[in-house]
Amino acid sequence: MTDKIAQSAEDVGDKVLAEGVDEEPIESNRRLFDGRAYLVMAGLSALYAAFHMVALNGVSISAWTGITIPFLPQFPMETWNFRIAHIAGALALGFLLFSAHFFHATGAPQRETRVVSILALLLLAPAFVSGATAISFVHMIHSGTLPQMGGLTTWAAFPGTEIYENEVWWFGIPLLIATFGAIVAGWLERRGRERFAASDVVLAVCALVVATYFIAIYDTAARNSVGTTFVPIGVAFAATAGSAMILELTRRVAGLALVIITAVFLIYTFSAHLLPGILAVQNAYTWQRFFGHVYSDAGILGPTTAVSSTYIILFIIFAAFLQASKVGDYFVNFAFAAAGRARGGPAKVAIFASGLMGMINGTSAGNVVATGSLTIPLMKRVGYEKKTAGAVEAAASTGGQIMPPIMGAGAFIMAEITGIPYQDIAIAAIIPAVLYFVSIYFMVDFEAAKLGMRGMRDDELPNFRDMVARVYLFVPIVILIAALFMGYSVIRAGTLATVSAAVVSWFTPHRMGLRSIIKAFELAGVMSIQIIAVCACAGIIVGVISLTGVGARFSSLLLDLAATSQLLALFFAMCIAILLGMGMPTTAAYAVAASVVAPGLVQLGIPTLTAHFFVFYFAVLSAITPPVALASYAAAGISGANPMATSVTSFKFGLAAFIVPFMFFYNSAILMDGHVLDIMRAGGTAIVGVFLLSSGVQGWFLGKVAASYLRLGLAASALLMIEGGLWTDLAGLTIAALVFVLQRLVQPKAGESIPVRGAD
């Protein structure tokens, strides 16, 4: 797909039309099944996604038909059980779909390791032993033979009892042997890309065994002992196996960055009693207590999984339905028709298109791949350097994560953690999102002006009238926004928008019938695996923080810093949020940073919404912050530029955006908190401030600005405008006017006779 689009971008006389920009890229370790294997995996993926749609809307087949089918889930499901099933399904699908190693890019035959595959198959024996034991526990719990306590079945798994011995020898140890043995075998095993790996089948079985045990045990009084020394030993075994599988799947689908950070937190848990200062804890944590705590609503089953099992997967299904109706292609083509004629047109198209695509895409890097495959070659063609073209796309794609109403699922996690209504968060995000994209636009425009770039010709662009005639493709987004602000729940609004996407498709050549709907659910099931694994992995970190209390001690450190300077405390919080977010998808980055940094900011007296937006903003910006800038590296892969040079340039383009979160602290009107006139003045002066800061960074203020002292003056005037007070605004405008006058006196012919790049 990328080669086809890039080729069309290089043909000067051809009309540029986006095709397939919203299709999911095929990862280099994803298996590509065919025949019966494909039908099985497609069916399982579609059922997994459809299960969530049914469960979230409380639909019961038994209520519809009047027939109760054994083992059929009854909705609405109990919360913990739903989250356990959510994670188990993602683990099982993920291991079967994503290999532990990369396949040959050339499609060369895979050298198979039959001996390892046979040894891996032997691990099915302990996995089945553990599974049979878990099923026997289910029968025992529902047999009515166990005593009751407070209306719940007791689970007396104390040392010396038969239940304890069974949990250790017939459930826990076989489960760990199968899990860790299969993980190691997966690193060694090589199978063809179209074939199942034996080790991955074992891991899928282990994931289901863990879920069976947890659902059974957490239906008893044993749930009350989670996080204490009385937690059943089997819970610790199952949580250990489950955590190991989550870490392995995260490594396969999201890389090592989050896995390494999680490993550091795990090491800290068991060594904290040996550390000095604020990192120390009084008593060492045992293996049983920690892992009995982590697989609960204080960890893996907590806020991150709560969001991934509801809002995130719902909007992934929505995105899959939009993809089926080719709305992503329309978004990009509409952006080209609207902005392609402006100077440096493809760069401005990247801003527009990435904002539209990014709000329904959960990762900045994924957004870069989706739209950058078209916009980056075109930016290079009109005169942008390779690193600049990649940097513009990276910065624009990152901004999609803060674009309401969806905000790349970040708004839903914020609502879950803070308890603030989602609608309030979406409204508060409007001005920050505008400021971000306005700052990127100014940076891009001034770069194009300095280089004398042209826009694209009419014969190169989609016809604007044709795009307007198909504006009804925006209807699903409009319905989503309207439903949210009419008071519908997020789940109901998302469901309505998904249904409307199918309806709208009937007015396009890509009509969605039953087969297309099933295909959309299949795509959603596959697309959801990465974000679910990442959220579950972030849940392990949240579990460490909640058990050790390191977040509270970090808050006390921020309070001590604030006693010296609140600005210093905010700067320190910014650095920690960026550091924690490096190399991680936005949702995981924010979830971790919110657990560590946000409570300390709240204790400083900063309002909860402001504190969490501050953290969220910098967690998003970590995607373009060197040295680990995932979005920039993804863009460099398309542009052919040096990754580090691209990340530094994208940081420069987003520099104005790094100032915006500090505006939340000094002027809450930026978050729609205050009188209408105050909000309008704050937004207006902030835009002027962003304009001045971009002018200073790029050296273009209504003409070229060469003198460094004039650029510093523009930066100073920008900061005064951004601060938000009446007198500071007047001072900022005065300095800007003085710079303009001096510029004309010192450089009376600035901006004239500029050589044109990219001309016909």
Image: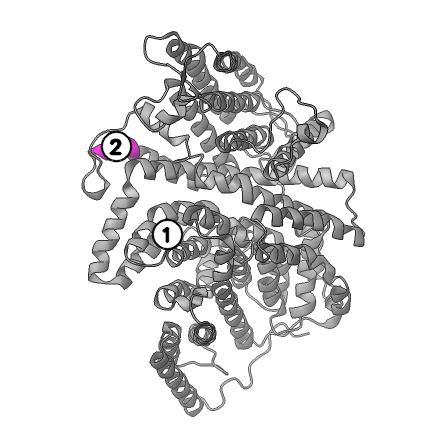
Q: Which residues are magenta?
A: 269-273
Kindly identify which numbered label has been placed on residue 528. none
Magenta stretch secondary structure, dominant: helix
Q: Is residue 253 visible?
A: yes
Instruction: Residue 287 in the image: state x and y as whole percent.
Output: 32, 24
Name which residue type carries label 1.
Answer: Ala
Q: Quadrant location of residue 43?
A: top right
Q: Is residue 508 visible?
A: no
Number of numbered labels in the structure image: 2
Instruction: Residue 337 in the image: state x and y as whole percent.
Output: 70, 67
Query: Which residue was labeled with disc 2?
Result: 271
Query: Which residue was labeled with disc 1?
Result: 577
Q: Is residue 289 above or below residue 127?
A: below
Q: Which residue shows up at 58% across the image and 77% down it?
A: 452
Of pointers 2 and 1, the one earlier in the residue sequence: 2
Residue 61 or residue 148, whichever sits in front? 148
Name which residue type carries label 2.
Answer: Ser
Q: Which residue shows up at 39% across the image and 58% down it?
A: 614
Helix, strand or loop under label 2: helix
